[in-house]
Image (cartoon, rainbow, N blue to C red):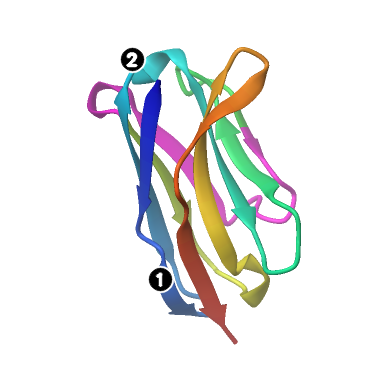
Amino acid sequence: QVHLVESGGGLVQAGGSLRLSCAASGRTFSIFAMGWFRQAPGKEREIVSHISRTGGDIFYADSVKGRFTISRDNPNDMLYLQMNSLKPEDTGVYYCAAQFGAGWSYWGQGTQVTVSS
């Protein structure tokens, strides 16, 4: 079992920045690939970025490439998402998730990000 808690969301103007954090507890953090997802109002949840156990492999959705940076701090059981040049379409609830086996098995409660135009 892994317990995930996101923080760092908020209201920001377009062009601004936010840094999301995800604190993990429970099983050893470094055994999981980790990801950030988001869900906008009226839309399905979508992958934003994910990072391998060691941080060597990283994926970004095309919509955030060049603006968002995912990172992890394994000794401190932390996952981060640095979000720059935010756009109104980045608005949504952001979730961190841990991958165990073939699926995303553990989820946080989410943190709201609102970007005003």
| Secondary structure of the residue carrying numbered label 2 | loop
- Horizontally, is 50 left or right of 89 in the view? left
Residue in the image at 24% along x and 22% along y: 75
Image position, residue 107 (x, y; %): 50, 37
Amino acid on which the number 2 mark rests in the picture: Thr
Residue pushed farthest left? 76
Residue 65 lies in magenta, yes or no?
yes
Decide if residue 14 is in sight here: no
Bounds of the magenta span?
59-77
Q: Which residue is mark 1?
A: 10
Labels 2 and 1 touching (C-beta < 8 A): no
Q: Which residue is mark 2?
A: 28
- Horizontally, is 113 left or right of 72 in the view? right
Image position, residue 72 (x, y; %): 39, 32
Residue in the image at 40% along x and 20% along y: 1
Count of numbered circles in the view? 2
